[in-house]
Image (cartoon, helix red, strand yellow):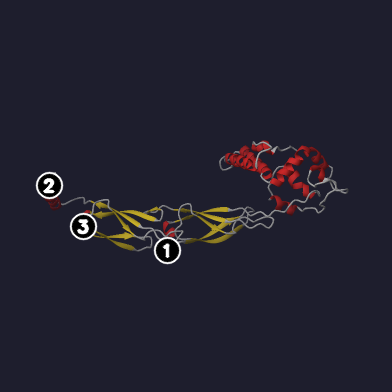
Amino acid sequence: MEYKDYYRILGVSRSASGEEIRRAYRKLARQYHPDVNPGDSSAQERFKEINEAYEVLGDPEKRKKYDTLGANWQQYEQWQRAGGGAGGRPFDWSQFGFGGEPGGQYYQRTITEEELGQMFGGTGFSEFFQTFFGGMGRTGGFESPRRARRGQDYEQPVEVTLEEAFAGAQRLLKLTSPDGRERRLEVKIPPGVKDGSRIRMAGEGGLGVGGGAKGDLYLVIKVKPHDVFERRGDDLYLEMPVEFTKLVLGGELSVPTLKGGRLALRIPPETQNGKVFRLAGQGMPSLQDRTQRGDIFVKVKALLPTQLSERELRLFEELRQIRGWA
């Protein structure tokens, strides 16, 4: 069995503080994360090794045991191969600093495989880790504490239309657990969601261990682009073509909304091309405050006539002369 120097793996000294160990772990975990190195088996093994090292050095109790036993690991391995004191006097862990003074308290109850998995989360770490942090309780040494661990959080992408983001929606999701089991979950999408909104479904994530709570499921929202509206925060923007005569003489413009109806927008006489009108409170609902809504901003674009008749051309020529346009 290969000895694991967890300090060397994380690149820290044996006197490193907890914060130094934490910083080193975060830096290496980002560097070797599988998402950053897709398909790189060596990076995956390195990532696993880094996490194993932090599992020990990041836990004050495990670190203490590791530091104490590390110099005697070969002696302990030989003792393990010899049967671990089975059939005789329990192994004297006090010589390794675990039991206080020699002749102190010994723990005789065997810890089951199920309890072992609950304590260490079925990590699949190296044989070295399992020997010193998984095998001890099984062979009658010190009794490891049973730590409750919260289940893993999961993310599920959900795509919605702008109309669904406006009014809210429902989805029936088909989820597959890590063990391959499938289940269906009906979820509600609240009005006002944006690109990147995360909706928490409490207790719908992974199972906890050792009595720990279940993790959560987070719905990550993606809003599809819209044919008419451009969304900016809770406001909606659109550009509408308007007959140039309506801009000159005034009139009404029918504006679509996400509610399904239309609004009448009054265009005052002599409106300039490109002017923006605001329809207050007709935009997206606020995700934080359902009583608040954004606005709709309408930019008018002059629609110029084509294929003019001779009379229309004469009228434009007359207008040019009246206005003194060159």
Q: Which residue has dot 1 on it?
A: 291
Density class for disc 3 (Cα within 10 Å; few <14, some 14-19, many ≥20) is: few
| Circle nearer the N terminus (1, 3) | 3
Q: Nearer the viewer, mark 1 or mark 3?
A: 1
Residue 127: in sight, yes or no? no
Q: Which mark is residue 324?
A: 2
Density class for disc 2 (Cα within 10 Å; few <14, some 14-19, many ≥20) is: few
- Screen quadrant of the C terminus: top left
Residue 71 lies, in percent from the top left, at 77, 37
Residue 267 lies, in percent from the top left, at 25, 58
Q: As drawn, is 202 to the left or to the right of 272?
A: right
Taking the spot 36% from the left edge, 58% from the top edge, the residue there is 295
Choose top left, top right, bottom left or bottom right for residue 55.
top right
Taking the spot 13% from the left edge, 51% from the top edge, the residue there is 319
Residue 31 lies, in percent from the top left, at 58, 39
Q: Which residue has dot 3 on it?
A: 269
The amino acid sitting under disc 3 is: Pro
Q: As drawn, is 18 to the left or to the right of 70?
A: left
Nearest the eye: 40 or 116:
116
The amino acid sitting under disc 2 is: Gly
Nearest the eye: 228 or 102:
102
- Screen quadrant of the N terminus: top right
Nearest the eye: 145 or 179:
145
